[in-house]
Image (cartoon, grey):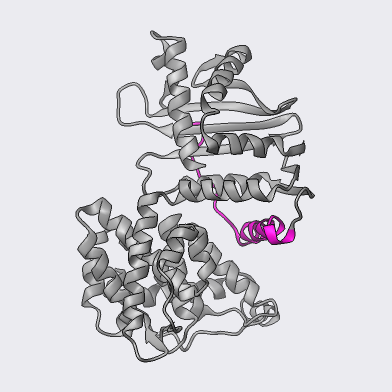
Amino acid sequence: MFRFLWRLCFLILGLGLLLSPVWSVLLLIEKQAWVTAAPAPSVASIGRAERLLREVDPRRLRQGQLKTVTLKEGDLNIALSHLLARPELTRKLHTQIDFEPGGANFQASFELPANPLGSFFNFSFTIVPSKSGIGVAQLRLGRASIPDWCTNKVLALLNEAAQQREQYRDVIAALRAIEKLTLTTSSAALSFRWDGALASRLGEHGRDLLLPAADRERLVAYRRQIHQTLGAQSKTSISLLDVLKPALQFAASRSSDLPSATAENRAAFLALALTAVGQPQAWNHLLGDELAYATPPPRRTVHLTLQGRDDLPKHFLVSAALAGATDSVVADVIGVYKEVQDSDGGSGFSFVDLVADRAGVRLAGKATNSPRELQQAIARLTREAELFPPSKDLAEGLQAADFKRRYSTRDSAAYQKVIASIEQRLDRLSLYR
């Protein structure tokens, strides 16, 4: 999706230039952005996203089944904004969707390189139901309004040219599978016929978009390196530090410059997270069956531990992988959401888990902003205490009623005091400064 929107910016900009060679630049480039702030995710929005994913789980749906899902306007805006907040995007693209009963208005602001004319290219259009599925109307490029007939003509030409690409044909097929679209001021309800084969192809296209071939090849390399490390162990468990150090040393050996160091660090954390979680199917989803089966898992299971626990490496590495792939805000909220879920009849809310979450997020930030320094800092570690601060005094196993009695809400002064203590503990370790 983010690559599609990225290309769409340049496509629409090019359309504007063709329409008015002389005045188009002055009309298109503006000094102010139409869309600026990215909405922050909440624990509730993460919960709704998880429930939506469960609703469209292929294992729960039958071929040809009519399925209706509801998307909240705010959740869609959150998903788009954080999907676009990727490290490899050097320029910011902010988007916003506003639902209305007659259609959905889409706005976007793309940050331009420094120039005397203006800093932003803004555009908007309205998505409306049509006989062919979904149509586009009211296109605006900066201060220029484009007639609908012109927009439709250009889209028809682009549609004809794009038909040669399988990815595009599958997206069109998915749009045509929508039998009903109902819009309100806050939500959109889509009714569609489930096609398992089409869903599988769309999943492959999404994987190729979010994890290009070069990134998948990196993951394979780290999977092999991690398996070698684990295979050399005679024990059934190993300290996270003893796996993290060789993985980052391997990353350093493959880093030729700062961009490659960032990419290598990100791949290392993702491979380590998948190893810690221990679900082989996750490798298949990310790599595809051919690459996943090319590197079989170790013959025996070796658990990663931190402070003698096998749950903390999962929190630490999954948070690091999430923060590297999206941003720290998403990773933080997902960590809190998991603890809230645990407090509702599960293992209970754990501030120790939150320490691991925050440590992973902060490490990922350093891996992206100072990739070489992070590789060197990990190489110097000799003890787990340099990786994870003391935390045995923090509360764990709090069920919802216990949490409410002690902390009321996550906005309370008592709760924020503990969160501040967690940050102070991490600040004392040189790795996180």
- Report if residue 96 is visible in the image: yes
Q: Is residue 219 left or right of residue 11?
A: left
Q: Is residue 103 above or below residue 29?
A: below
Q: How many marks?
A: 0
51 above or below 150?
Answer: below
Q: Closest to the observer: 325 or 409?
A: 325
User: What range of the chain is rendered magenta?
Assistant: 32-60
Instruction: Please give the name of the residue rendered at 50% of the width and 43% of the height, measured from the top-left corner.
Output: 37
Q: Nearer the viewer, residue 283 or 423?
A: 283
Query: Where does residue 337 sit, x and y in percent of width and height?
Result: 59, 67
Q: Does residue 184 appear in this view?
A: no
Q: Could you say which is closer to the camera, residue 418 or residue 351?
A: 351
Percent x, y for residue 336? Answer: 56, 68
Residue 36, magenta (yes or no): yes
Q: Is residue 142 above or below residue 275?
A: above
Give the x, y percent position of residue 24.
42, 13
Quadrant location of the C terminus? bottom left
Question: Which residue is most to the bottom?
Answer: 235
